[in-house]
Structure formats: C-alpha cells, structure tokens
Image: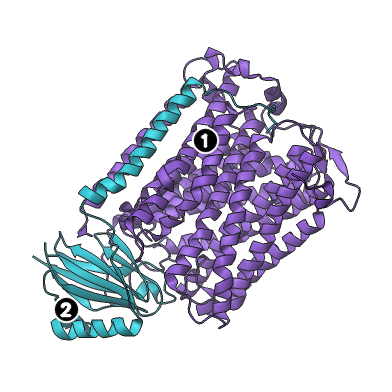
Chain colours: A purple, B cyan
Amino acid sequence: MTTTTADFPLPARDTDFRTCPVTAYKVDLAAERLIIGNAVAAIVFLLIGGIFALLIGLTRWQAIHLLNPEWFYRLITAHGIDMLIAWIVFFEIAGLYFGSTVMLNARMVAPKWGWAAFALMAIGALMVNYVVLFGRFNEAAIMFTAYVPLEGHPLFYLSYILFAVGALIGVILFFANIVTAKREGRYTGSLPLVVFGLATAAILAVYTLLMGALTFVPALLWSLGVIENYDSEIYRNLFWGFGHPAQQVNLAAMVSVWYALAAITVGAKPLNEKFSRLAFILYLFFINLGSAHHMLVDPGNSFVYKTFNTSYAMYLAVLGSLMHAFSIPAAVEVAQRLKGFTRGMFEWLRNAPWREPGFSGLVLSMFIFGWIGGVTGVTIGTEQLNITAHNTMRLPGHFHATVVGGTTLAFMALTYYLIPLIFRKELKFKKLAIWQPYLFGFGMVLTSIGMIVSGLQGVSRRHWDISFASAVFKVPIPGTVDLSLAVMGIGVLLAVTGGIFFMTVVLTSVFTGKRVEASRLLLVSGESNPLEESALVSFEDMEQHHVHPRGTFVIVLAFLMFFVLYYFAQWWLLARTWIVR
Amino acid sequence: MLAPPRIWWRKLGRYEKNWLIVAFIWCLLLTAMMPLWFIFGRQNVPTTTYRTSPAEFQARVDDFVARYQVGEEQNIPIVAPPAGGDAFLLGRQWQWYPILRLKLGETYRVHLSSLDVLHGFSLQPVNMNFMVAPDYDYVVTFTPTTSGEFSIVCNEYCLIGHHLMTGKIYVDE
C-alpha cells in the first residue's frame, strides 16, 4: 500500500474516549452516539413493523380475517419494508459501528458522514412508509418486491435509493474505521472473529447495495416515464441480485452476533479460528449465487444456470452454515466443560445459563434458524422441489424462521447487553427479559410451522382470502388448513407478546433507566466476567480430552438426520404430482 | 470477541474434521440430486420459453378457443385441446382464461403468458406452481396423472383483485 495517512479522514475534533469498566474497551463517544441513534431507529421500525405483523397475522388467520383487502395489501407491503429493510439494516449499521470501533478500541473516523448516512436512511424509511400507507393504492401496495410491471410512485423507488445510499455510506465508514484502527495501532493481532464476520457482512452489503442501485434507478426512471420498457424478468433477476444477498448480509451479521453472544454469556472462544473464518469465506464467495432461488420456476432460465446458482456452486455456502452450526455450540460446550461440567454428553448443556437472555436467545435463534429456516430453505431452493413450494406459504414460513426467529431474535438478545454497555442505562424489568426469548422464540416456531404446513397444502402467500368467498370459481381448501393457519395465528400472538416484552424492557430502560456505568457483563446469572475468563483459556486447555465437544457432535448428527428426512420427504411429495417437463 | 494472536491457523480437531467431511458429503449429495432427478425424475421444471407480446398471445388464445371450444361456464369458454397438442392459458387481472378440459394420461403443451402484470399459476390441490410473465410464452408440458376438477389460483400478487383470480382445469378419465 502506498497510501498515506492523509488519504484517510482525519479527526476534525479531539476524539473523546471513555473506558468501559466491564470490558476494558475504549469507547469513542462519537461512535457511541451513532450506535445509539441507529439502534433506536431500528427499534422504532421494529415496533411499527410489529404492529403491522399483528394485523396481518390476524387477517391471515382465516377465522378472524381482520383487515379489508386494501389495508391487508398495504400493510403487508409496509411490514416487509419496515422489518426486512429498516429494522434489520439500522441494527446492522449500529452493529458495524460497534464492531469497527468499540471492539477494536478504535475511533469513528467521520461521525458527520455517519449522521448523514443516518439521515438518508431515516428519510428513505419514513418516506416509503408514507407512500405505502397513504399513496394511491396501485402505486403504493406493490409489495416489498415491487415486481415490474406493477408501477410504484416515483417516491417509492426514490426512498429505496436514498436508504441504500445511506446504508452504503455506513458500510464504507465501517471499512474506514477498521483501516484507520489498524494504521493507528489500536489493536494487535488479527481482527477478532466477530469483526471478521461483520466484515464479511459488510463486503456482501457493498455488492447488495450496488445491485439495489442497478435495480431501482431504472425503476425510478421507468416510473417517471424516462425509460419506456422495463422487462419483468430482467427486473426479477436484478431485484433478487439485491434481495437475496441482502438476506446473506443478515446471515453473516447474525452468525457474528452468535459468536458474540456465546462469548458474552459463557466465555466461549472459537475452537479453531481457521475453521470459523473459512466458513465466513465460503459465504463470501458462494452465497450471492443464491439469487437464482427466486427464479426457479420462471420462464427463460436453463436447467444448468438454475442448478449451478441455486446450489451455491456445490452447496458451499450451506457448508459454511453447517460449519458454524458445529463450531458455535462446540465452543459453548468446551467453555462449559472447562468450568467443570464434564460428566456425560450433556451436563454442560443442562448447566448452561438458561436464565440469561443472551444465552437462551442464542440457542433458540440457532435452533429456529437451522432446524426450521435452514432445512426448509435448502429444500425449497432445490430446482425441481421448488415446483411444489414457489409462492406458497412455505416461503414466508421459511424466511420468518431465518430472519425473525433467527436474525431478529439474535439481535434482540444482543440488545440487552448493549443497553448497559453502550446506552449506559441499568436494565429494567429483568424478569421480562429472561422470559422474552422463550416467548418470542416459541411464538416464531409456531408461526413458521403454521405457515409451512399451510403452504404444503397449497395455501398461497400474500393472499387476502383463501376461502375464495367472492371469487368466480371456488377453490376447495382442505379443512386442515384452518388448523395450520390457527397455529400460525396463535404463534403470531405469542411472538407479538414477546415483542411487547422486548419493547417494554428496552424503551423503559433507555428512557427511564438509571444512568450507571455497567458493573458486569452478565445480566442475571452470576457476577463473573466470561470475557475475562475466556481470555485466560489457552489453546492447550481447549485440546484436553475431557473437554472435547462430544455432545455437540451428537446434536449436529441428529440435525443432519432430520435434514435428510425432511429433504427426501419433499422428493416423495413431488413424485406424487403431475408429470411435467 | 477478543482479537486472536497473529497466528491463529491451527490443525483442525478430530470432531471438526469429521463434521466437515460428513457435511461436505451431504452437500455433494444435495448437488447430485438435481441432475439425477433431471435424468430419472418425472417432474422437471419446464425451460421452453418463447418471446411473445400481450397482443400476439391474446390472438393465439382466441384462435385456440375458436378452434376447440366445447362448452362454457360462468361466461368463460371450456376448451378441449387435442391430446399431444398445444393449449393456451392466459392470466390477466383477475382471471385465468379459458377453462381447459384435458384427458388423463395424455400430454399437453400448455402455453402460459400474462396480458398485464406478473401472475402465479398455482394448480390445486396438486400443488404445482409456475410463474406467468407478460411477453414470455412459457411452455409447460403437462401429463395429468389424476382426474377430476382442479383449480388454478393466482399466487403472485397482482393488485387489489389478486385473491379473486381463480381458474379451472378439468381432467377426464
């Protein structure tokens, strides 16, 4: 590198640091304010999206059927945007700033740009909500995906673009922070694994956001009449070049948060940095191919194109996830065994801090993401199997398990620790916080399974009335659908209650909590500092025979067995349909 | 969460290595299933696609209906294409047109296209789903293996009447 320090933004101010008494990390106050700003915005949009979720859930629960079609389609559009874009990306930007400053003892290079990014994202998110809720129906309720030739209001596309530009600035700041931290010698050795994972997410995000520009700038011009024609399938291809990788950003960020939660709650230390980092690198190289998942039963694509892309070359990105699925619980197991819980296969698990929301959140998030979201995702992303799944409720069933039960739950669990460490407020209603991951997680399990089972029976996603009461031709729907939709509805109610718990804890703590310097890392269980303990553990300690992760190996084999069963059951179902070529 | 020492690459442990091997074999099997089913399976995603336009496709559908109409239901013609021949089905806001009458075990080239926005062809209760896009003539070569009355639901959102968009296919013994 021939660049000089002058190429990087220099601080226009004297950086104010405070030292965190718990972690001994230095915290740049400018970074802290940005993290707080983005996290608060994230939670506001989670609240809005959550209210919409309740209303949508109660509409799809056929026995209740709450909203009229106009509001159902408007809210389902807004729900997708507020959750999948606003809540998650705001939180990820907060996470990126946290990872690139606090975790590296480093400073925020250009806080003003950080606030500019924040403003762009906030304007974009608020504007798109306004358009979707109050615009003319045909220009507003066009879904999160906004498939051309559905033609949104120009402001709809402009909001997406503003938000994406803001997010891109945030991602660039992340890289600038890391480079500056390295140059200024703020940390020694390699990047911590969590930051490495976040860097993976950030690299994927750059690609994602550029694809977003490629999708929505033409859409904006088209809606303004500058471009006459926008081919629907080209739009779909471009859109999923943006939309699918966006989920992989969430994936990489979530896995990083998993490693962080394991470290915070039990002092888990990655067993083998090479193994875990390789898994992230597999994401980097292969996961973007997955955009073809959405085009498997579209006209125009060849078998080879679809198979290569949908399988991530050779399921190499799936391999990355399978590796994390082993290495994270294994790290937890080894950390627990080192504390003396060595009896049998699972003493370490029985004696885990189940009352610590960071730990229960981690376990439930991993379980829902892997066992429900991952297994169904790989299955419906198989070229031929997609025939029986495309646009049915199996799709939302799958991604509510990954993005809500997985990512959102992990982010919620992390938030509990950010409040004392970054907001420097004492956590209120700890009891609610202890129960929240269980309630929310169980609710999402029911929601996802209810959706998947409905979808298996042919129920469409994004559909106001599956009783077809006023349609020309009635469609006989099996009675069991009422049951599976009720399971979904009850799941929604539980998850929303869990969401209310979360909001109560977070909002009351942030706005009315006592301003205190955090005194410990854990919220409820014990006075110890797992991070400090893990710093004392050496590789040699981790290699002793009695701490080997035997229990985890059994768990992952059970998982694989379940995966195999579900996967082949779907081929059996496909074989019972009409012959088609 | 802590920065590891500069040199962090170490040999994999026994459990990690075993899991990596097992997981990789599963990934290879997942990869192999698609080409295997392509060769030996009876359900494969159609790939035959032609360029068309709404006006052209409408004309072909009208021609098809005029030639093979056998009845009418709810003001929508019922059309029985010859076995082994071409059938045309269009989606538009918010209707599938026309109704098809097929024979069990015979093969038909069903051309799907849309006159306006994207639609989703969802055959129920068989539960087979394909995308229908304007300007694309997507040829789905079907051989019905069950008989009776089947519904077509639209499962790609197409504005306010989306949930009203249903159609029908009859399959005779």
Q: Residue placed farthest to the left in the image?
A: B173
Q: Which residue is mark 1?
A: A324
Q: Secondary structure at mark 1?
A: helix
Q: CA distance from mark 1 to mark 2?
A: 55 Å
Q: Quadrant of the C terminus of chain A?
A: bottom left
> Residue A521 location in percent, x, y?
72, 32
Discs 1, 2: same chain? no
Q: Chain of mark 2?
A: B
> Residue A223 location in percent, x, y?
55, 79
Instruction: Identify which amino acid the numbered label 2 is placed on.
Output: Val
Instruction: Identify which amino acid the numbered label 1 is placed on.
Output: His
Q: Residues within 10 Å of mark 2 (few under 14, many from 20)?
A: many
Q: Chain of mark 1?
A: A
Q: Quadrant of the N terminus of chain A?
A: top right
For residue B79, which numbered disc appears in the image?
2
> Residue B118 location in percent, x, y?
40, 72
